[in-house]
Amino acid sequence: MIITTAHTTGSVLAAANSGRTGLRMEAMMERGHHQIRKDSASSVTTSISATRRRRARRTFSSPHDKDEEEYIGFATLPEQVHRKAVKRGFDFTLMVLGESGLGKSTLINSLFLTELYKDRQLNNVEDRIHKTTQIEKKQLEIEERGVRLRLTIVDTPGFNDSVNGEESNKPIINYIDSQFDQYFKDESGLNRKNIQDNRVHCCLYFVSPFGHGLKPVDVDMMKKIHQKVNIVPLLAKSDMLTPSEVKKKKAKILQEIEQHDIQIYEFPECDSDEDEEFKKQDQELKLAVPFAIVGANTVVEVNGKRLRGRVYPWGIVEVDNPNHCDFIRLRQMLISTHMQDLKDVTADVHYENYRATYLADQMKTGKERKFTRSPNHRPSVRSSKLKRDSTPNFEAVMDTEKLLQQKEAEIQRMQAMLTKMQAQLETKNNSNNNHIESSA
């Protein structure tokens, strides 16, 4: 009887528990269905007011209540510019100018750790008598930590080698102007997306260590190009001089540059937020001008360390030792810290000066051609055609007018496309609003 009673009591308790569980299940299902009906009923209201809430958060936000929902996203613009610039790569054109035998090729090989002039043959004395200045351009692509640099080296062999050096500067000036002219034509053309910047961004001018400063040919050459390119003067082969002689020659070169009103590259001032270490390095670079440089591609061993240098009977000159020469400072200025500023000065100062002079000459030529024409003279068709054909700038003017017409047509096509796209967007927005209203 006790067993039967216990079994019966267990059955009753189990039935009661199952009944309560069923009631709880039914209540939960009922609340779930009610919640689903509530969510479906408020879905349209939520979609309609979502835009209003976002607009309200941005429009009526309190200055003391800043949260992540107010983050717009334009703070990532520098990262976008960085990614795009790294993907596109960088261009830099460097010209080396100076007499033969001052170590121009050796310095370039030391700066960029390459061998650009393996097959160069030196001319004898008889060939140099009537030799003219040549322009040799070498291009190479260097990649470092995912950053690509398209480097162009412009060498000037034969400069001031001939007996009559009056014509030695013309090829150099013509090359610099031709690069400006080519960039101006590319900038004025229709396809401006893939313009190659071959303008000379920096000119390393080698001053001979022999003598007492600048030679007349150096002064004449610098004065003819100082408004066209950034000049960085170098005291070549400074290992031939004692430290006191290097100091005296630097002061003499700067004095003569100022005396002849030669404009060399000026270092920009440091920003106020820069740290003290960077300001100190920048001050050292400014005081090192003109840079006393030594170039060497040979590797020597000193106290168990392998380094680049030149071996002499009295000792070894280390290229990478700032106590021996200014090679490290020159490389830091040229590549690490001021390469972009050299490009900016070329684009904002030298190229703009060339462009303004070119446009002024074109306007002056057009006015002179206009005022030399008689007001009562009516030329015939044949005579006017002959005059047009004899006008040197007529073809350039016609090409410019043709380009302007093509640009105007292209702008009109783009405006028509924009109008069409705006109409499509308005139609799409109206259809979406109608759908929301019908659903409500």
Image (cartoon, grey):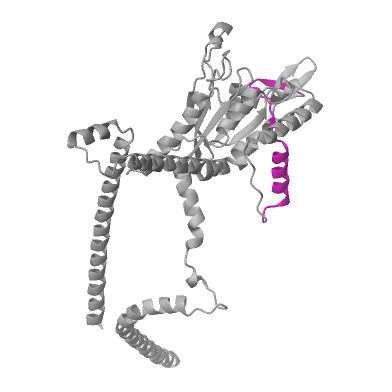
Q: Position of residue 53 (x, y in %)?
A: 41, 79
Q: Is residue 366 visible?
A: yes
Residue 163 vs residue 414, the one in the foreground: 163
Q: Is residue 248 left or right of residue 353?
A: right
Residue 226 vs residue 47, the one in the foreground: 226
Task: Report the residue at 53% width, 8% height from top.
Answer: 127
Q: Is residue 54 magenta?
A: no
Q: Position of residue 144 (x, y in %)?
A: 54, 37
Task: Report the residue at 43% width, 89% height from top.
Answer: 3
Image quarter where the C terminus lies is bottom left
Residue 137 vs residue 165, the one in the foreground: 165
Task: Report the residue at 62% width, 39% height from top.
Answer: 265
**Residue with the most extreme left position:** 381
Image quarter where the N terminus lies is bottom left
**Residue with the most extreme front position:** 376
Query: How many marks are shown on the rendered structure?
Result: 0
Residue 164 vs residue 199, the one in the foreground: 164
**Residue with the most extreme top position:** 126
Task: Report the residue at 22% width, 38% height from top.
Answer: 379
Q: Which residues are magenta?
A: 273-302
Q: Is residue 140 visible?
A: no
